[in-house]
Image: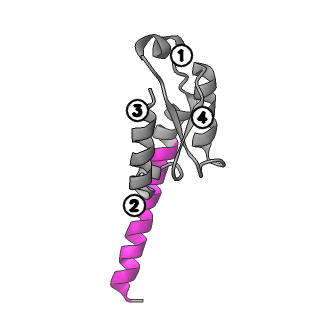
């Protein structure tokens, strides 16, 4: 591998490390410790849909989505893909979203 390629890889690794550190030190903390005001959500919305990717079973987001649905007293609604199914399977995700929105 050329020294330019090695340098690019090292820079990419350093960038990833910085972004990961920021995520774990700052952003993840808020998403794992915040508890929504269930009464306010229920009062402010005509309908609440908690979506979860069909392939997200082992992810932290699956547990938080399931807990949110239980807190709000609504079912979890399955969507295609994993956590970012809208990126992975945009057409199937859009079809499912249209179906969910039309049913309410």
Give the magenta range: 2-24
Residue placed under numbered mark 2 in the picture: 15
Looking at the rendered image, the disc whose residue lies closer to the viewer, 2 or 3, is 3
To which residue does mark 4 refer? 64
* Mark 2–mark 4 distance (CA, rounded to whole Å): 28 Å
Along the polypeptide, which appears first: circle 4 or circle 3?
Answer: 4
Question: Which residue position is annotated with label 3?
Answer: 102
Dominant secondary structure of the residues highlighted in magenta in the image: helix
The residues bearing labels 3 and 1 have C-alpha atoms spaced at a distance of: 24 Å
Q: Name the residue under label 1.
A: 38
Return the disc, 2 or 1, that comes first in the chain's sequence. Answer: 2
The residue at the far left in this view is 4
Q: Which of marks 4 and 3 is in front?
A: 3
For image coordinates 59% across by 52% down, the residue present is: 55
Local crowd size for mark 1, using a 10 Å CA cut-off: few (<14), some (14–19), many (≥20): some
Q: Which residue is drawn at the image coordinates 51% and 15% (left, top)?
A: 37
Let me know if residue 13 is in the magenta part: yes
Q: How far apart are marks 4 and 3 (CA)?
A: 25 Å
> Of tags 3 and 1, which is closer to the observer?
3
Query: x, y percentage for residue 36?
Result: 52, 21
Examine the rendered structure and indicate whether residue 79 appears above or below residue 32. below
Is 7 one of the magenta-colored residues? yes
- Contact between labelled residues 4 and 1, with CB atoms less than 8 Å apart: no
Mark 2 vs mark 4, foreground winner is 4
Q: Which x, y percent locates residue 27?
A: 46, 39
Give the secondary structure at mark 2.
helix
In this rendered view, identify the residue nearer to me: 65 or 102. 102
Identify the mark nearer the N-term, 3 or 1: 1
On screen, residue 47 versus residue 70, left or right, reads left
Closer to the chain start, of discs 2 and 3, is 2
Q: Which of 22 and 77 is in front in this view?
A: 77
Which is nearer the N-term, disc 1 or disc 4?
1
């Amino acid at each position: 591998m050329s020294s330019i390629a090695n340098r690019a890889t090292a820079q990419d690794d350093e960038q990833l490390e910085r972004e990961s550190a920021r995520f774990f030190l700052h952003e993840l903390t808020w998403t794992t410790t915040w508890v929504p005001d269930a009464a306010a959500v229920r009062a402010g919305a005509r309908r609440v849909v908690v979506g979860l990717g069909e392939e997200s079973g082992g992810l932290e987001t699956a547990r938080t989505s399931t807990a949110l649905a239980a807190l709000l007293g609504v079912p979890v609604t399955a969507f295609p893909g994993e956590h970012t199914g809208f990126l992975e399977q945009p057409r199937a995700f859009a079809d499912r979203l249209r179906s969910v929105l039309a049913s309410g």
